[in-house]
Image (spheres, helix red, strand yellow):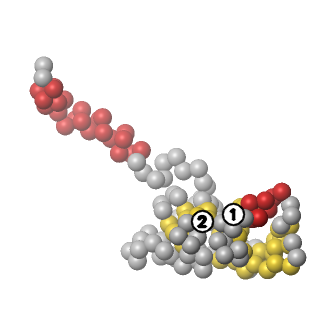
């Protein structure tokens, strides 16, 4: 039997059965490592920048996760803090990307946010709400993150 004849003999049902699992696995939600959580409230904590916990903040572009907050030393050396919880569907997958000047990114659905929390996705995107940004204050080696 020639290949063309074999493919015709499979029919639409068999083709659907073969391709359906692939189509389903292409969804960004499948295999998501994060959890859906509520955005933190009453945020007020400190980080000792000399501690092992803060090691990634020693370099520009580095970040750490603490109390559902992404704490960043941006590419200019300033500290910025944002909710780790994406404003799109509340997954706790927001991270900092040190490219294109630095931005916050949620890999669940591709939401991108500027360092001021504004939405960088297109106007018709699924993420119209800004990302929550927290205040930071540096005193010596102690960084305070608060609302």
User: Which image quarter: residue 35?
Assistant: bottom right
Q: Is residue 95 left or right of residue 147?
A: left
22 vs 14: above or below: below
* Residue at (78% x, 59% y) in the render: 55
**Foreground of the two, 39 or 84:** 84
Q: Are marks 1 and 2 in contact (CB under 8 Å)?
A: yes
Above or below residue 109? Residue 115 is: below
8 left or right, relative to 115:
left
- Number of residues whose C-alpha sits closer than 10 Å to that of mark 1, classed few (under 14), some (14–19) or many (20 or more): many
Tell me, for residue 62, which label it has, or none: 1
How packed mark 2 is, by other alpha carbons closer than 10 Å (few <14, some 14-19, many 20 or more), is some
Closest to the observer: 80 or 34?
80
* Residue at x 48% of width, y 53% of height: 29
Query: Is residue 111 visible in this depiction of the protein?
Result: yes
Compared with 16, 147 (above or below) is: below
Instruction: State the residue lying farthest toward the top.
Output: 1
Can the viewer see residue 80?
no
Q: Residue at x 53, y 58 (%)?
A: 107
**Residue matched to label 2:** 98
Asked which quadrant contains residue 140, the reply is bottom right
Q: Is residue 104 left or right of residue 15?
A: right
Residue 21, position as x, y percentages in the image: 37, 39
Residue 27, labelled with which disc?
A: none
Question: Residue 112's x, y, as percent?
Answer: 51, 69
What element does badge 2 sit on?
loop
Where does the C terminus fall, quadrant-wise? Answer: bottom right
| Place of residue 48 in the rendered image (x, y in percent of width and height, measured from the top left) | 86, 67
Residue 41 position within the rendered picture, expressed as x and y whole percent measured from the top left = 72, 73
């Amino acid at each position: 039997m020639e290949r063309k004849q074999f493919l015709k003999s499979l029919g639409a049902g068999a083709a659907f059965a073969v391709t359906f699992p692939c189509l389903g696995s292409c969804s960004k939600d499948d295999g998501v490592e994060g959890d859906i959580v509520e955005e933190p409230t009453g945020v007020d904590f400190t980080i000792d920048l000399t501690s092992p916990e803060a090691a990634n903040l020693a370099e520009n572009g580095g970040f750490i996760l603490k109390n559902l907050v992404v704490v960043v030393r941006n590419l200019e050396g300033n500290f910025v803090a944002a909710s780790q919880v994406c404003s799109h569907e509340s997954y706790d997958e927001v991270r900092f990307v040190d490219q294109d000047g630095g931005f916050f990114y949620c890999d669940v659905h591709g939401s991108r946010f500027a360092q001021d929390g504004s939405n960088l996705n297109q106007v018709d995107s699924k993420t119209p709400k800004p990302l929550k940004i927290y205040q930071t204050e540096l005193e010596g080696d102690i960084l305070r993150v608060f609302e």
